[in-house]
Image: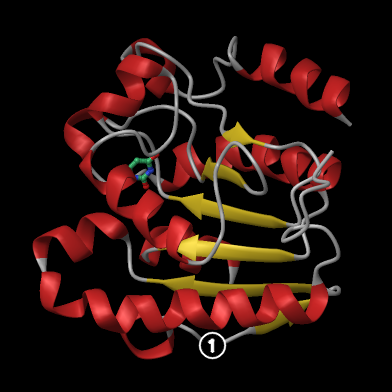
Amino acid sequence: MELQLEQLRQQCVQCQRCSLCQTRTNVVFGTGVPNAEVMFVGEGPGQNEDEQGLPFVGRSGQLLDCYLQAIGLHRDKNIFIANIVKCRPPNNRDPLAEEWEACMPWLRQQFSIIQPKIVVCLGRIAAQRMIRPNFSVSKEHGQWVEKNGVFFTATLHPAALLRNPIQKPIAFEDYVAIREKIQQICTHTYSSNTK
Ligand code: URA
């Protein structure tokens, strides 16, 4: 599994399937443990992520890490974090349909290797691509949708919470519900034996 994911990463960092390859500094493949039962999916890299080649390393990433820590999750221990698009859209605009369509096969392959039991969509773009095209994060965050035995949910994007901090407690409830779901259906996320 580890080897498969590494092989996929090596292919992905050379990707030229859409024009974002011309403006990126680094492909942001994703980070975490290969046997994660819980996967978080964001929208796409911002400037910091593009520079470092890692997801969620800017201010919104710091906030995400706080929420994760609060429910016993850590990007290097028991989850995997990826994005809908692996390369930064210029000026952080929304990814275009042709960009996310070109990029989705990478995420699908990450899914088939990692085989998560729970997928948490961070924000509208991820929720609409992963759950339903007309999914409303503001109205439907925290709800669970089961597809082929995998449980999907969405919460507010951490960048949106930085812009609108009054919503932080609402998002925290989503994380508490994620912890409960993990306790119900995951076998090793909360045990020390993550390998
Ligand atoms: N926002 C995202 O959606 N993904 C990142 O990796 C960073 C910020």
Front residue of 195 and 128: 195
User: What is the x, y in percent for residue 57?
Assistant: 34, 33
At 83% from the left and 26% from the top, the residue drawn is 2
Q: Quadrant of the C terminus?
A: top right
Kind of residue at badge 1:
Gln
Q: Looking at the picture, tell me which residue is in the foreground, 33 or 69.
A: 69
On the rendered structure, is 22 left or right of 16? left
x and y percent of residue 15 in the render?
Answer: 59, 16
Q: Within the displayed image, which quadrant is ligand 1 positioned in?
A: top left
Q: Work out whether 37 lies above or below 117.
A: above
Residue linked to disc 1: 143
Q: Secondary structure at mark 1?
A: loop
Q: Residue at (54%, 83%) from the top-left corner?
A: 177
Above/below status of 17 relative to 161: above
User: In which image quadrant can residue 23 be found?
Assistant: top left
Q: Quadrant of residue 184?
A: bottom right
Picture mark count = 1
